[in-house]
Image (cartoon, grey):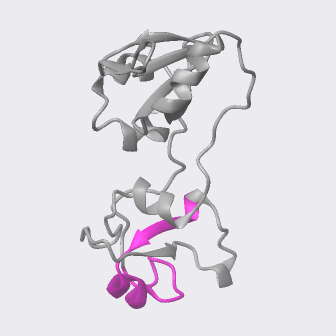
Amino acid sequence: MHEPVLVLNANFEPINVCTTRRAIMLVISGKATLVMNGRGEIHTVNRCYPRPSVIRLEQMVKRPRPTVRLTKKEILRRDDYTCQYCGQRSPYLTVDHVIPRRYGGQYAWENLVAACPACNHRKGSHTPEQVNMRLLRPPKAPPANATYLFARHLTNNEEWLPFMEGW
């Protein structure tokens, strides 16, 4: 009952992921319709309900375009948990300001990268050019598309991919 279910807007745009329990309640109350049932059924005393994988809301929900929040977790995820100076993959990474704050570097996607503690210490409060270090990739904001936003749920839910591609 706690498996993820993809929620689509009335125009088939992916907008959220909810639990199976919540999805069934939305379908029973008439607020959503079942789009894909790839998980069997749920049996109650009186009825059988299909266990949804994807549901679509009946009414269009207006909402602002989603953005990815600037957090350490998202910076590490954007950089694939890889040091942007030496290329080492590690679960123990720090966030480095490419242009240090003392030189006017901002707290922004374009100025923050994942760095291993050794490279971060070696760079210190200098620019990469001052200490002869190069970035593997220039930093930029990650895409705020459905595939990136709901990526952690996609490993067990390949049937969601057709709904993710256009957004």
Q: What residue is shown at x 39% (from left), y 22% (from top)? A: 53
| Up/down of 150 relative to 96, above or below | above
Q: Nearer the viewer, residue 44 or 7?
A: 44
Q: Is residue 70 magenta?
A: no
Q: Position of residue 43 (x, y in %)?
A: 37, 20
Q: Position of residue 134 (x, y in %)?
A: 36, 70
Q: Is residue 5 left or right of residue 68?
A: left
Q: Residue furthest left?
A: 88
Q: Which residues are magenta?
A: 110-132
Q: Quadrant of residue 41?
A: top left
Q: What residue is shown at x 67% (from left), y 32% (from top)? A: 65
Q: Quadrant of residue 154?
A: top left
Q: Is residue 114 magenta?
A: yes
Q: What residue is shown at x 45% (from left), y 38% (from top)? A: 150
Q: What residue is shown at x 45% (from left), y 10% (from top)? A: 35
Q: Quadrant of the N terminus?
A: top left
Q: Is residue 79 left or right of residue 149?
A: left
Q: Nearer the viewer, residue 13 or 24?
A: 24
Q: Position of residue 49 (x, y in %)?
A: 42, 14
Q: Residue furthest front?
A: 45
Q: Is residue 36 left or right of residue 61?
A: left
Q: Is residue 126 left or right of residue 107?
A: left
Q: Position of residue 60 (x, y in %)?
A: 71, 13
